[in-house]
Image (cartoon, grey):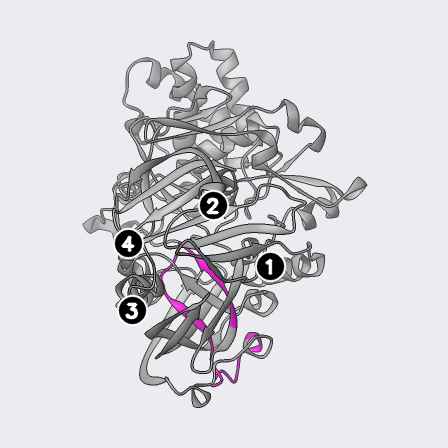
C-alpha cells in the first residue's frame, strides 16, 4: 500500500474539544470542538506504538487494573486515547487549576498530572496539579496504578473541589499521576481523563465525578447525553449535556435498552447485518459497550473480517488462515455438512485441543501446566479454524455451493485486519458500499458508507479507512462490541444512570 498508506492508516479522526460552559433550561452544556489533523502527532504515535509493540503493557498485569474492570479474568484494553481525543476543560482546587480532560464513558476515575511527577516526560508537557495552591485540598495518599492499552499511569489519591462548567463538585477523590509510562501521553492533547463509567470499575472504588454531581444535587436529572456533530467541516464538534437532553440534538424518539452489567455502559445487541444480510453472529445476543473514549467500532475478528471484505478493505494476508483452508477445508466442510456441532469441529480436526476449549469458556484445566508447550502457531491455527467454521456455517445457511463457499472464505482470509487494526478502502468506491446495521432493542440502527468510512488527507494524499477494528474477547464475557464515536456521531446517545439504561435517537 506504500508508506503513505501505512502512515496515514494510523489516523482515526483525531478529534478534540474545548469547554464552553453555560446553563440553559437547567442543563449544563459542554461545547465540543474538532482540531486540525496533526500529522506530526500521527508520526509520533506510530513511533510510540512501535516502541510498545515488543513489550506492550496491558490491562490485567497489576492488582488495580482488575478493579478497573470489576472482574479478574478476560481483562483487556478498550481504547487508544490518541485515536479519540474529545476533551474539555475542568478546574481542580480553590481557586481552580485548569486541565484538559477526556470525557470518557469507558472508565470511571479522574486523574491529572501531579506537581510531584518528576521522572515522566509527559508530565512536563502538560498542566500540573499543585495541592499547595488549593484552599480545599485534602490529603489521601492511597497509591494506585492504572494500565491502559496505550500505556500506564501511577500515582496517589487526593481530594479537592472539581469545577465542571458552572458547578463545583466538592470533596472529589482523584488521582495525582506521578508517572505516565508511555510516549502516547507525551504527545496527547489532553492532560488527564474524567471517567463517566460506573463506580464498579473505579480503581480503589473511588466515587466518580458524575456520581458526586448527582449526590450533591448539582444536576436536574441523573442523565447526561452526547451530541457529536456529523459535519466534518463544522467548527463545533457537538455538545455534552449534563442533567438531561437537548431536543435540538436529535429527531424522533430514543430507543432505550437496559444496562446489562454495571461497570461500563454495557448493553445487549442483537443480529448484525452487512448490506441487509445477517451475519448470524449475534443472533443469540452480544454484549456491547457504548464508549465515548473510543473513536472506532470494535468487534470480533470474524465479523470485522467479513465487513472489511464486503467494503473492499485491504488487510494483512493471514498465512495460517490460508493454511487451514488448504489442508483442512474439505474435512471441515464434511463435518459441518454431516451435522457435527460447530463447537466440536476444530477439536475433531485436531487444530484445537481441550485446553483451548476450556480457556474459551473461562475455565482453567488441572493439566494446564503440562500443556504449556502449545506453540503460538498451534494457537493461531486453532483461531483460524474457529473463524473458518463460522464463515462456512454462515454460507451453508444461505445454501451456497461448495465452490462459492471456498472462494468466499479464501477472500476473507485476505481481508483479515492488520495487527494494528487498520484497513484501507478505495475512496472512489465509498458510495457503492453496503450499509452496516446493528440491532439494538429490536430496532435497526444503520450506518451508511460515508458514516463508517473515515477520510484523512486531501487530493493524492487522501486515504479512506474502515471504521471497524478487530477486538476479541472469548465467552462467557464475549463476543463483545464497542460502539465508539463513529456510532455516537450518527445516533444521539443518552446515558441514564437513574434508570440504568442507554438511549439512541437519530442525531440532528
Q: Earlier in the sequence, mark 1 or mark 4?
A: 1
Q: Which residues are magenta?
A: 99-122
Tell me how far mark 1 sits from mark 3, CA to CA: 34 Å
Residue 206's disc is 3
Task: Name the residue at 33% across, 18% down.
Answer: 335
SS class, disc 4: loop
Question: What residue is shown with label 2?
Answer: 484
Camera-nearest label, 2 or 1: 2
Tell me how far mark 3 sits from mark 2, CA to CA: 25 Å
Tell me how far mark 2 sits from mark 1, CA to CA: 24 Å
Q: Earlier in the sequence, mark 3 or mark 4?
A: 4
Residue 73's disc is 4
Question: What residue is shown with label 1?
Answer: 50
Q: Earlier in the sequence, mark 3 or mark 2?
A: 3
Residue 309 x %, y %: 56, 28
Residue 221 x %, y %: 31, 53
Q: Does the residue at mark 3 contact the one at mark 2 (Cβ under 8 Å)?
A: no
Tell me how far mark 4 sits from mark 2, CA to CA: 23 Å
Residue 264 x %, y %: 33, 52
Amino acid at each position: 500500500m506504500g508508506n503513505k498508506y501505512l502512515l496515514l492508516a494510523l489516523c482515526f479522526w483525531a478529534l478534540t474539544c474545548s469547554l464552553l460552559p453555560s446553563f440553559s433550561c437547567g442543563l449544563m452544556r459542554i461545547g465540543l470542538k474538532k482540531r486540525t489533523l496533526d500529522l506530526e502527532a500521527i508520526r509520533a504515535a506510530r513511533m510510540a506504538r512501535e516502541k510498545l509493540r515488543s513489550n506492550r503493557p496491558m490491562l490485567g498485569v497489576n492488582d488495580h487494573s482488575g478493579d478497573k474492570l470489576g472482574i479478574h479474568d478476560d481483562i483487556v484494553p478498550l481504547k487508544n486515547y490518541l485515536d479519540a481525543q474529545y476533551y474539555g476543560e475542568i478546574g481542580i482546587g480553590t481557586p481552580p487549576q485548569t486541565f484538559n480532560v477526556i470525557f470518557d464513558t469507558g472508565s470511571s476515575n479522574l486523574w491529572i498530572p501531579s506537581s510531584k511527577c518528576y521522572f515522566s516526560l509527559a508530565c512536563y508537557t502538560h498542566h500540573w496539579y499543585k495541592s499547595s495552591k488549593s484552599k480545599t485540598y485534602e490529603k489521601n495518599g492511597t497509591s494506585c496504578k492504572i494500565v491502559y492499552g496505550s500505556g500506564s499511569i501511577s500515582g496517589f489519591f487526593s481530594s479537592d473541589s472539581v469545577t465542571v462548567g458552572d458547578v463545583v463538585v466538592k470533596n472529589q477523590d482523584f488521582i495525582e499521576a506521578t508517572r505516565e509510562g508511555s510516549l502516547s501521553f507525551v504527545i496527547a492533547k489532553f492532560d488527564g481523563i474524567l471517567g463517566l463509567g460506573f463506580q464498579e470499575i473505579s480503581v480503589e472504588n473511588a466515587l466518580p465525578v458524575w456520581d458526586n454531581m448527582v449526590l450533591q444535587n448539582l444536576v436536574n436529572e441523573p442523565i447526561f447525553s452526547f451530541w457529536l456533530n456529523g459535519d466534518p467541516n463544522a467548527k463545533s464538534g457537538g455538545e455534552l449535556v449534563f442533567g438531561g437532553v437537548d431536543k435540538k440534538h436529535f429527531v424522533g424518539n430514543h430507543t432505550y435498552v437496559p444496562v446489562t452489567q454495571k461497570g461500563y455502559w454495557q448493553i445487549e445487541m442483537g443480529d448484525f447485518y452487512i448490506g441487509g444480510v445477517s451475519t448470524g453472529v449475534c443472533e443469540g445476543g452480544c454484549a456491547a459497550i457504548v464508549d465515548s473514549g473510543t473513536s472506532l467500532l470494535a468487534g470480533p475478528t470474524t465479523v470485522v473480517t467479513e465487513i472489511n471484505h464486503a467494503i473492499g478493505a485491504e488487510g494483512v494476508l493471514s498465512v495460517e488462515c490460508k493454511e487451514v483452508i488448504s489442508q483442512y477445508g474439505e474435512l471441515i466442510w464434511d463435518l459441518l455438512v454431516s451435522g457435527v456441532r460447530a463447537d466440536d469441529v476444530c477439536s475433531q480436526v485436531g487444530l484445537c485441543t481441550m485446553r483451548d476449549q476450556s480457556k474459551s469458556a473461562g475455565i482453567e484445566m488441572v493439566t494446564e501446566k503440562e500443556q504449556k508447550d502449545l506453540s503460538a502457531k498451534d494457537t493461531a491455527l486453532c483461531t483460524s479454524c474457529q473463524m473458518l467454521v463460522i464463515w462456512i456455517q454462515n454460507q451453508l445457511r444461505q445454501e451456497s455451493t461448495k465452490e462459492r463457499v471456498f472462494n468466499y472464505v479464501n477472500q476473507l482470509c485476505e481481508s483479515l485486519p492488520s495487527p494494528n487494526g487498520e484497513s484501507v478502502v478505495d475512496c472512489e468506491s465509498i458510495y457503492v458500499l453496503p450499509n452496516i446495521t446493528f440491532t439494538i432493542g429490536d430496532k435497526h440502527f444503520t450506518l451508511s458508507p460515508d458514516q463508517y468510512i473515515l477520510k484523512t488527507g486531501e487530493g493524492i494524499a487522501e486515504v479512506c479507512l474502515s471504521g471497524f477494528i478487530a477486538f476479541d474477547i472469548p465467552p462467557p464475557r464475549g463476543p463483545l462490541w464497542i460502539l465508539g464515536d463513529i456510532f455516537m456521531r450518527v445516533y444521539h446517545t443518552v446515558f441514564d444512570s437513574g434508570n440504568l439504561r442507554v438511549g439512541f435517537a437519530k442525531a440532528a
